[in-house]
Amino acid sequence: MTQNPPDQDELLHRIHLDLIDSYDEEIEMEIEDHEYDASGKPVRVAMDELKKQARRRYFEELFRLQGELVKLQDWVQHTKHKVVILFEGRDAAGKGGVIKRITQRLNPRVARVAALPAPNDRERTQWYFQRYISHLPAGGEIVLFDRSWYNRAGVERVMGFCNDAEYEEFFRSVPEFEKMLQRSGIQLIKYWFSITDEEQHSRFLGRIHDPLKQWKLSPMDLESRRRWEEYTKAKEIMLERTHIAEAPWWVVQAVDKKKARLNCIAHLLTQMPYHEVQHPAVVLPQREHHEDYARRPVPAEMIVPEKY
């Protein structure tokens, strides 16, 4: 069924709201703990009542889920579990946003992000999966791939960066590769973030008009917009041929970015039998004082000017 495109006023309104939301996301990343009470409820939100309530609910649930992610992290470290999480989807589908919220309060030595650039000349001559292997986790680690080896089934196929033989070999190899990971003790979780044609169009326009996000739009992104249908066909083939019991695909409905983040994190938490790990009570030791110690003043020319 063909959807009628939104009129110009409606589209501009949506872009405006998306810009506000994008800045809201950045504010969210910088909010200080003292702006919330002990239960995690915001105490100062400057907006109308309905939006205030929706934002409060979002933050309350996000903070609750992030607390559970910290417990999951402790459990992964304690049990030496190994986890790989793949995030795939169209450009502007919200993969980076959910990765930020997952890792926001975690230890970067435990939960790290792998976002590989395009392969260089040497890597193009390697076994296709070779450059991804060095990023796989050791015991007690979680690795989040912001795009992955599934580039071959998507962008490489659509843009002609691989030939038919390489494409078919990928589909023969990837189930065996992922089964091998599973047998080696690596848990593999695969998410596809799904947005509509209309939503991607709106988000791309928002990036064009937002000077803080224009860098996110590459020539490849713009070309992917033109080839929407080709990407759709490639995605459908990919999901059909690589949805295996050892590593199934999970589709996240991502038109609403905030709901997508919460839904993805909540689902991720169900994929491991984690529990709270008890730690010894932390006791802050008394600072030592020595009579012969005197703090030296910092030279004035080394001080960063206090403009704020």
Image: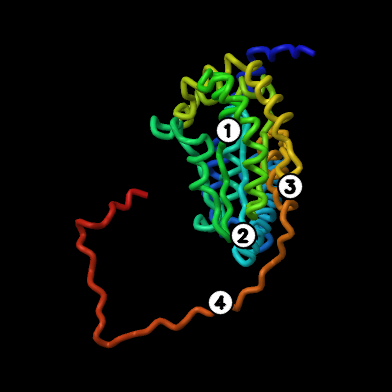
Q: Is residue 188 visible?
A: yes
Real-space Cα distance between discs 1 and 3? 27 Å
Q: Quick one: label 4, few (<14), some, or many (20+) residues within 10 Å? A: few
| Amino acid bearing label 3 | His
User: Tag 2's secondary structure?
Assistant: helix
| Amino acid bearing label 1 | Ile
User: Tag 1's secondary structure?
Assistant: helix
Give the mark nearest the N terminus, 1 or 4: 1
Give the mark nearest the N terminus, 1 or 3: 1
Please name the residue that numbered disc 2 is placed on: 73
Give the mark nearest the N terminus, 2 or 3: 2
Name of the residue lying farthest toward the right: 1
Name which residue lies at 28% across and 53% down.
Answer: 304
Give the mark nearest the N terminus, 2 or 1: 1
Real-space Cα distance between discs 2 and 1? 32 Å
Please name the residue that numbered disc 4 is placed on: 282
Q: Nearer the viewer, mark 2 or mark 1?
A: 2
Please name the residue that numbered disc 1 is placed on: 20
Q: Nearer the viewer, mark 1 or mark 4?
A: 4
Real-space Cα distance between discs 1 and 4? 41 Å
Real-space Cα distance between discs 4 and 2? 18 Å
Q: Nearer the viewer, mark 4 or mark 2?
A: 2
In this picture, residue 273 sits left or right of residue 24: right
User: Tag 4's secondary structure?
Assistant: loop
Residue 89: x percent and y percent? 63, 31
In this view, the residue in front, 12 or 74, is 74
Give the mark nearest the N terminus, 4 or 3: 3
Please name the residue that numbered disc 3 is placed on: 267
- The quarter holding residue 1 reads top right
In this view, the residue in front, 280 or 125, is 125
